[in-house]
Amino acid sequence: MTGSDAGRPFVASPLLKQRFDLATGRCLDDADVSVPVHPVRMSPTPAAASAPPPAA
């Protein structure tokens, strides 16, 4: 689920009902919760996201 809060886009967890700012990963409903953010490139084909390599 997606939406915006005060002009800032967010994605919401359908299970926990937490909303996360797409730019920062911060939870809009709980200051102690955040998720990692990754660069995304939009193009006419599906979006591409890059993530850091897994830790060894």
Image: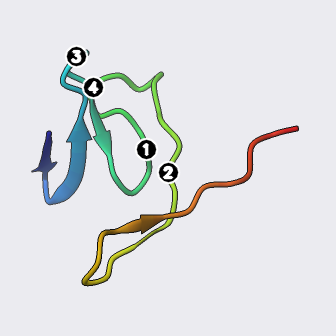
**Quadrant of the snapshot with the N terminus:** top left
Instruction: Give the Cα distance between marks 2 and 1.
Output: 6 Å
Residue neighbourhood size for the residue with mark 3, other residues' Cα within 10 Å, grouped as few (<14), some (14–19), many (≥20): few
Answer above or below: position of 20 versus 23: above
Q: Name the residue under label 1.
A: 25
Sequence-wise, the earlier of marks 3 and 2 is 3
Q: Mark 4 points at which residue?
A: 29
Q: Name the residue under label 2.
A: 37
Nearest to the observer: residue 29 or residue 46: 46
Instruction: Give the Cα distance between marks 4 and 3.
Output: 14 Å
Q: Mark 3 points at which residue?
A: 15
Q: Is mark 2 on a helix, strand or loop?
A: loop
Q: Are marks 2 and 1 in contact (CB under 8 Å)?
A: yes
Sequence-wise, the earlier of marks 4 and 3 is 3
Instruction: Give the Cα distance between marks 3 and 2.
Output: 20 Å
Q: What element carries label 4?
A: loop
Residue that appears at 56% across and 62% down: 50
Task: Look at discs 1 and 4 and give the one toward the viewer.
Answer: 1
Sequence-wise, the earlier of marks 4 and 2 is 4
Q: Is mark 3 on a helix, strand or loop?
A: loop
Residue neighbourhood size for the residue with mark 1, other residues' Cα within 10 Å, grouped as few (<14), some (14–19), many (≥20): some
Q: What residue type is labelled 4?
A: Asp
Q: Do the residues labelled 4 and 3 touch (CB within 8 Å)?
A: no
41 horizontally vs 14: left or right: right
